[in-house]
Structure formats: C-alpha cells, structure tokens
C-alpha cells in the first residue's frame, strides 16, 4: 500500500504532522512494516488535484485506487486508526473478510477512544456480513448503535434482516 502526505510551505499542521505523528515510534513501525510512504509538496505528483487544506493524507491500494483520505493534522493515535482502516479496506477489496475483521477488531481493542471508532465498528460488521456471519454483524452493529447513536455510521447499521439461528 502507498501513503502520500501532501504538504505546503509554512503550514503549521504539516509541521505538526511530521514532528508529532510521522515521527511517533508506533507510527514509524507501522509505516515501515506495511507502507510505501511519499511526502510531496502541494505541487507534487500523484494526481491529487482537489487540494484545499493541508496536510492531505491519502492511502492507496496497489492499483493506486484511494482507500482513505483525510485533510488536516492527524494525531498519532488517530493516524494509527486511519492506517488500519485503510488496510482493512484493502483486505475487503481482496475478499479477505476474516483478515479485515481481525485487523479491525484489534484496532477497536487497541484504540477505543478514537473518533474513527464508529467507522471501525461499522466495517467490522461489514466484514462479518461478507464472511457470512450475520450474528456477529448484528452484535457489532448493536454495539455501534448503542455506543454511538448519533454517528452517521450507526444510522447505516440499521438491521433490516433477522439474523439466522
């Protein structure tokens, strides 16, 4: 997977991204293990033409399709979840549903206070459903709806089908 961080000169969020997030030992370890990382300035390559805020971080799959994109500074704790959600999305695209669910379950346990947790729980349910585990989907989506009732991800997780026994 490829990660592109687009920055701009004299951008305080960009400076923080390098100083606090990308230099975090945990983030560095994750990036070294799984990612090809490119830092480019605002006029750089990679076909990102709709930039309005910096830094902009884009995660791509092996075919350079976008897995995730975020604008602005991302603290290390949240950046780890960003990376894991991108990895899980890549695994879903590869039909590796159990592996995707495993990555997301570990993320849920490791980073429970992340603002991205409703999305993480939603995709645990998606991976479970695609892996033909409707009871697991129902259980996780119930947790999502109970814990984050106002999140848009909870609204998407309305079960319209009964789980099979």
Image (cartoon, rainbow, N blue to C red):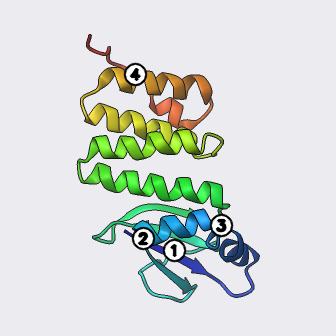
* Mark 2: secondary structure: loop
Looking at the image, residue 14 sits to the left or right of residue 88; the answer is right
- Specify which label sits upstream in the sequence, 2 or 1: 2
Q: Nearer the viewer, residue 46 or 123?
A: 123
Q: Which residue is mark 2?
A: 35
Number of the label disc, if any, that sits on residue 50: 1
Q: Which residue is mark 4?
A: 138
Asked if disc 1 and disc 3 are in contact, CB closer than 8 Å, the reply is: no
Asked if disc 4 and disc 3 are in contact, CB closer than 8 Å, the reply is: no
Give the foreground label among 4 and 1: 4
Number of the label disc, if any, that sits on residue 162: none
* Mark 1: secondary structure: loop
Asked if disc 2 and disc 1 are in contact, CB closer than 8 Å, the reply is: no
| Disc 1 from disc 3: Cα separation | 14 Å
The picture quadrant where one finds residue 70 is bottom right
Number of the label disc, if any, that sits on residue 72: 3
- Specify which label sits upstream in the sequence, 1 or 3: 1
| Disc 4 from disc 1: Cα separation | 38 Å
Quarter holding the C terminus is top left
Q: Nearer the viewer, residue 24 or 149?
A: 24
Q: Position of residue 10 (x, y in %)?
A: 75, 85
| Disc 3 from disc 2: Cα separation | 20 Å
- The answer to whether residue 119 is visible is no
Residue drawn at (61%, 30%) of the image: 148
Give the foreground label among 4 and 2: 2
* Mark 3: secondary structure: loop
Q: For the residue carrying disc 1, how many other residues have a C-alpha within 10 Å: few (<14), some (14-19), or many (20+)?
A: few
């Amino acid at each position: 997977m490829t990660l592109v961080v687009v920055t701009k000169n004299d951008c305080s969020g960009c400076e923080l991204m390098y100083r606090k997030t990308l230099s975090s030992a945990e983030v560095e370890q994750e990036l070294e293990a799984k990612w090809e990382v490119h830092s480019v300035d605002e006029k750089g390559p990679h076909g990102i033409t709709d930039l309005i805020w910096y830094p902009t971080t884009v995660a791509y799959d092996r075919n350079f399709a976008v897995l995730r994109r975020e604008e602005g500074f991302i603290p290390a704790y949240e950046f780890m979840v960003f990376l894991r959600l991108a990895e899980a999305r890549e695994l879903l695209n590869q039909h590796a549903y159990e592996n995707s669910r495993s990555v997301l379950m570990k993320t849920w346990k490791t980073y429970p206070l992340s603002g991205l947790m409703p999305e993480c729980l939603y995709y645990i349910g998606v991976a479970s459903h695609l892996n033909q585990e409707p009871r697991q989907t129902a259980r996780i989506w119930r947790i999502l709806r109970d814990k984050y009732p106002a999140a848009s991800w909870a609204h998407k997780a309305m079960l319209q089908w009964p789980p099979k026994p």
